């Protein structure tokens, strides 16, 4: 395994690739993330909520070994950061300058199969009334069109992070975190467009609600297997015990119905709310599930050789973390099976260092 620095700046808090996305075209890779100001805290996220978060993307032209950081090349309503309202105080938040009608419908059907295309989902905050939207790029993230509108699908809020499966030029399935009846995140819903993003229809909910106080099922990671089966992994927390896990659902009818097939990861320490999954198909029939393990402050993976039913022991890709303010993995896989995984991390011994973006190159 090899590790490369993507972004690391003194005094800065860089985080959450899982919220934004990662895309590959040959040896070229782009990953999205956000950057704010570092602040010493006793626990939790070491960011200064009085300072704005700004969107960034990093590009590698050599398969993840070297990276150049760029601004996000798309329209930001009010110049404010995407998908980070909960990390900023009033006066800095996107929802203060944007409402659900700000985003438009694409003027023409989008083509999701253009060779150099990318799709990114975004949101305002997390609480009741959160709304979401999306951007598309046709030039390897050198420019982004949007924001384009996502409906609320009758939910109390939609808090989208980037997760979708392209089925054809104008057809794609998106997996969205929806807020529950009490206005809190989360449940996972599956929606589809058949007209290039001009309209969306809700298909189903992935798994039953986790209804007790403090429960959630959020932050899906999905893929489609060669035989057509859809898989969707969820980040889950059980409020009564404050323990977290990742479970995996399958659909054999293109998202109309779902069944749970395994629980690949069970975190042992209560109180840290787990970490989102990153699910990959390796090309040789195996699956890989990558995640941040806040029990052991490490970036980890497991392998399945039977379509997600059974999983290997935990494999540590990057150890030595200082505390649980880390993870949120995004990854891409190459034709030879090489995986490039990005995540945010901190490894200073006192736990008070900058949060930075790193990449691990791994051959499973």
Image (cartoon, helix red, strand yellow):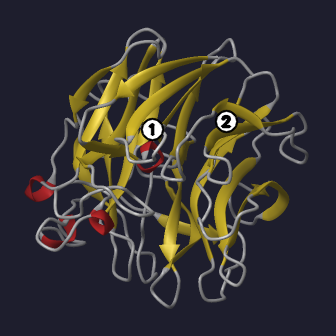
Q: Position of residue 59 (x, y in %)?
A: 34, 22
Using the image, tell me which numbered label, if any, was put on residue 348. Answer: 1
Q: Quadrant of residue 204?
A: bottom right
Q: Position of residue 190 (x, y in %)?
A: 58, 63
Measured along the vertical axis of the image, is residue 263 above or below residue 328? below
Q: In the picture provided, is 29 more to the left or to the right than 219?
A: left
Name the one closer to the observer, 194 or 162.
162
Q: In the picture provided, is 69 more to the left or to the right than 157?
A: left
Measured along the vertical axis of the image, is residue 99 above or below residue 168? below
Within 10 Å of the Cα at label 2, are there few (<14), some (14-19), or many (20+) other Cα atoms? many
Q: In the picture provided, is 231 more to the left or to the right than 70?
A: right
Whether residue 115 appears in this view of the structure is no
Question: Which residue is rendered at x = 45% and y = 46% of the image?
Answer: 350
Measured along the vertical axis of the image, is residue 347 above or below residue 41? above
- Closer to the N terminus: mark 1 or mark 2? 2
Measured along the vertical axis of the image, is residue 349 above or below residue 65? below
Q: Are marks 1 and 2 in contact (CB under 8 Å)?
A: no
Instruction: Pick out the residue farthest to the top.
Output: 62
Within 10 Å of the Cα at label 1, are there few (<14), some (14-19), or many (20+) other Cα atoms? some
Task: From the image, tell me which residue sits under label 2.
Answer: 280
Q: Position of residue 282 (x, y in %)?
A: 72, 26
Using the image, tell me which numbered label, if any, was put on residue 331. Answer: none
Quadrant location, the C terminus: top right
SS at badge 2: strand
Quadrant location, the N terminus: top right
SS at badge 1: loop
Question: Which residue is rendered at x = 20% and y = 72% of the image?
Answer: 99
Question: Which residue is rendered at x = 25% and y = 72% of the image?
Answer: 100
Q: Position of residue 232 (x, y in %)?
A: 68, 54
Q: Disc 1 and disc 2: Cα gap in Å?
A: 30 Å
Name the one closer to the observer, 135 or 28.
28
């Amino acid at each position: 395994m090899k590790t490369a620095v993507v972004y690391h700046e003194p005094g800065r808090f860089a985080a959450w690739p899982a919220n934004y996305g990662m895309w590959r075209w040959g040896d070229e890779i782009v990953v999205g993330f956000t950057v704010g100001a570092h602040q010493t805290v006793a626990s939790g996220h070491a960011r200064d909520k009085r300072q704005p978060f700004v969107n960034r993307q990093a590009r590698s032209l050599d398969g993840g070994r070297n990276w150049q950081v760029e601004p996000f090349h798309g329209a930001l309503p009010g110049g404010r950061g995407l998908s980070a309202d909960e990390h900023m105080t009033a006066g800095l938040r996107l929802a203060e300058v944007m409402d659900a009608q700000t985003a438009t419908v694409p003027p023409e059907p989008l083509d999701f199969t253009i060779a150099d295309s990318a799709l990114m989902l975004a949101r305002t905050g997390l609480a009741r009334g959160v709304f979401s939207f999306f951007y598309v790029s046709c030039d390897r993230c050198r420019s982004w069109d949007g924001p384009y509108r996502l409906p609320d699908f009758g939910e109390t809020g939609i808090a989208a992070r980037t997760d979708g499966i392209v089925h054809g030029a104008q057809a794609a399935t998106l997996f969205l975190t929806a807020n529950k009846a009490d206005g809190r995140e989360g449940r996972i819903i599956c929606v589809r467009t058949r007209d290039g993003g001009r309209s969306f229809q809700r298909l189903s909910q992935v798994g039953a609600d986790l209804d007790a106080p403090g429960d959630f099922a959020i932050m899906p990671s999905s893929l489609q297997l060669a035989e057509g089966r859809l898989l969707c992994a969820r980040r889950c927390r059980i409020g009564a015990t404050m323990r977290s896990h990742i479970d995996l659902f399958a659909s054999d009818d293109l998202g109309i119905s779902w069944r749970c097939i395994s629980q690949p990861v069970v975190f042992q320490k209560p109180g840290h709310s787990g970490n989102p999954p990153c699910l990959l198909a390796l090309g040789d029939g195996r699956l890989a599930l990558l995640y941040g393990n806040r029990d052991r402050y490490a970036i980890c993976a497991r392998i399945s050789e039977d379509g997600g039913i059974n999983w290997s022991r935990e494999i540590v890709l990057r150890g030595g973390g200082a505390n649980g303010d880390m993870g949120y993995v995004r990854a891409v896989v190459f034709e030879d099976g090489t995986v490039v995984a990005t995540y945010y991390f901190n490894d200073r011994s006192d736990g008070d260092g900058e949060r930075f973006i790193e990449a691990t190159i791994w051959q499973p």
